[in-house]
């Protein structure tokens, strides 16, 4: 292909066929576009024996808004390269990229059709005990091995430049840290919680903390992040989790990835009373808090072990420094989790956890709880010493609202 063209099903078939040996010469191929994300086209290309691959193409605009929001197609390169890099350090939990074409801005990748999207499963009340340990392993390995603990100074700077990703970072900068804290036209606020959202626009103490978190997002290139690690970016089956959708990847603060995922577990936790009946809701909430605890514990254990064993920079071998580093990651994690809660409730990009609650009164109550907890996590993050204290804050908030 000599120039960019938006794929139709036939183009996706030709692309998949040309760049894989999978189908063979006499295969009858079909393709269906089934993307329901915010940005891209996603095709499943399948032969008559059921063998399939995914073709993902970046559109030159944000799909969820339309052509009025132009967006770089270079995000396909970023996604392919982040996934390849993360797969080097955690192959078990990263989707496999088979081919990337820089002109078509298209990626050919493994089809995880036997897997389900984690968010859909959690909303249906499913429980997976392997979720936290596997995602902790994914984050600890991908984030450690792309950090200053391992990369040489020269290589790190070259990698930071290769993954600059300014346009997608700007989306996050706006949607996470700016829009929810002002009366922005992109915001999507249910009228029933407008009175709870408006105070965010004038809460100077909160805005100061959010500014600090944003400043770190802008200026702390600690590791190559996934950049959008919510529960829609994770496929899961009964044994394994696999991470997809890394187009927001860039070098940023480690706590951003950990906080995004923690924030999504907490969003689901807060939505439970609206999604399930009483008994199921309590059981699902207990499960989610166990997973949240294990996620941080295992992440910090593996990261600590890697720092002790694999650090290449002699100055960064200092164990006091390493402890301090992880403590700061924990505080950042709490803060970014709080931002994720708030932006998914009043910002542009909502999540089904909250939006699929049918009962309008319950939905509003769950959303209000999310705004409150988000604020507390952001404001109290520097006083939270460990994950138990953070989860006590979550329980305390929830108990307070039940009374
Ligand atoms: C316009 S993009 C909106 C959101 O979708 C992506 O998955 C990111 O979470 C982004 O913030
Ligand atoms: Mg995505």
Image (cartoon, grey):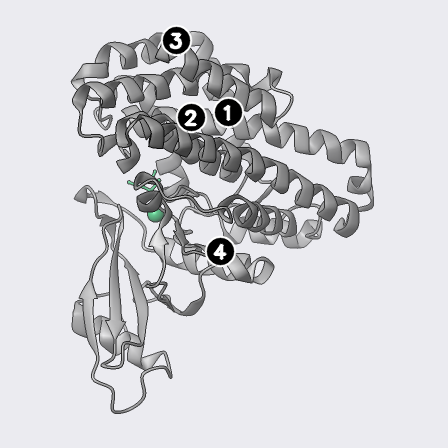
**Mark 1 C-beta to ligand 1 under 8 Å:** no
Mark in front: 1 vs 4: 1
Residue under the image location 37 percent in, 53 percent down: 75
Asked if marks 1 and 2 touch (Cβ < 8 Å), the reply is yes
Identify residue for label 2: 339
Identify residue for label 1: 335
Asked if marks 3 and 2 touch (Cβ < 8 Å), the reply is no
The image quarter containing residue 23 is bottom left
Mark in front: 3 vs 2: 2
Residue under the image location 41 percent in, 56 percent down: 237
- Element type at marker 1? helix
Identify residue for label 3: 203
Relative height, residue 90 to residue 29 (above, below): above
Left or right of residue 401: residue 332: right
- Point out residue 359 in the picture as x, y percentages from the top left corner: 18, 25
Tell me the crowding category of disc 1: few under 14, some 14 to 19, or many 20 or more residues within 10 angstroms, Cα based.
many
Left or right of residue 105: residue 69: left
- Asked if residue 207 can be seen in this view, the reply is no
Mark in front: 2 vs 4: 2
- Point out residue 109 in the picture as x, y percentages from the top left corner: 38, 67
């Amino acid at each position: 292909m000599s120039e960019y063209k938006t794929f139709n099903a036939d183009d996706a078939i030709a692309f998949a066929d040309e760049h894989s040996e999978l189908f063979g010469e006499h295969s009858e191929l079909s393709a269906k576009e089934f993307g329901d994300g915010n940005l891209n086209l996603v095709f499943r290309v399948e032969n008559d024996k059921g063998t399939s691959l995914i073709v993902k193409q970046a559109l030159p605009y944000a799909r969820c808004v339309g052509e009025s929001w132009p967006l770089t197609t270079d995000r396909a390169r970023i996604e392919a390269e982040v996934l390849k890099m993360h797969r080097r350090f955690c192959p078990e939990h990263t989707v496999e990229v088979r081919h990337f074409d820089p002109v078509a801005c298209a990626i050919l990748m493994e089809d995880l059709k036997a897997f389900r999207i984690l968010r859909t499963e959690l909303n249906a009340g499913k429980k997976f005990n392997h979720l936290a340990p596997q995602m902790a392993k994914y984050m600890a390995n991908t984030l450690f091995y792309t950090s200053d603990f391992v990369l040489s100074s020269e290589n790190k700077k070259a990698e930071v430049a290769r993954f600059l990703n300014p346009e997608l970072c700007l989306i996050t900068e706006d949607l996470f840290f700016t829009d929810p804290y002002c009366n922005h036209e992109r915001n999507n606020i249910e009228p029933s919680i407008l009175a709870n959202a408006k105070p965010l626009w004038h809460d100077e103490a909160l805005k100061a903390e959010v500014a600090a978190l944003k400043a770190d997002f802008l200026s702390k290139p600690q590791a190559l992040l996934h950049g959008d690690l919510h529960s829609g970016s994770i496929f899961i089956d009964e044994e394994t989790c696999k991470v997809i959708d890394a187009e927001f990847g860039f070098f940023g603060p480690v706590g951003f990835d950990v906080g995004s995922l923690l924030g999504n577990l907490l969003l689901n936790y807060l939505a439970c009373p609206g999604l399930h009946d009483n008994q199921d809701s309590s059981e699902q909430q207990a499960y989610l808090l166990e997973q949240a605890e294990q996620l941080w514990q295992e992440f910090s254990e593996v990261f600590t072990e890697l720092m002790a064993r694999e650090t290449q920079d002699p100055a960064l071998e200092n164990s006091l420094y390493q402890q301090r580093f992880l403590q700061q990651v924990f505080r950042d994690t709490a803060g970014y989790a709080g931002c994720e809660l708030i932006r998914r409730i009043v910002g542009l990009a909502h999540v089904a956890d909250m939006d699929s609650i049918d009962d309008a009164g319950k939905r509003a109550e769950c959303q209000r709880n999310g705004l409150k907890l988000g604020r507390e996590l952001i404001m109290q993050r520097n006083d939270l010493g460990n994950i138990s204290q953070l989860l006590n804050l979550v329980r305390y908030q929830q108990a307070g609202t039940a009374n």
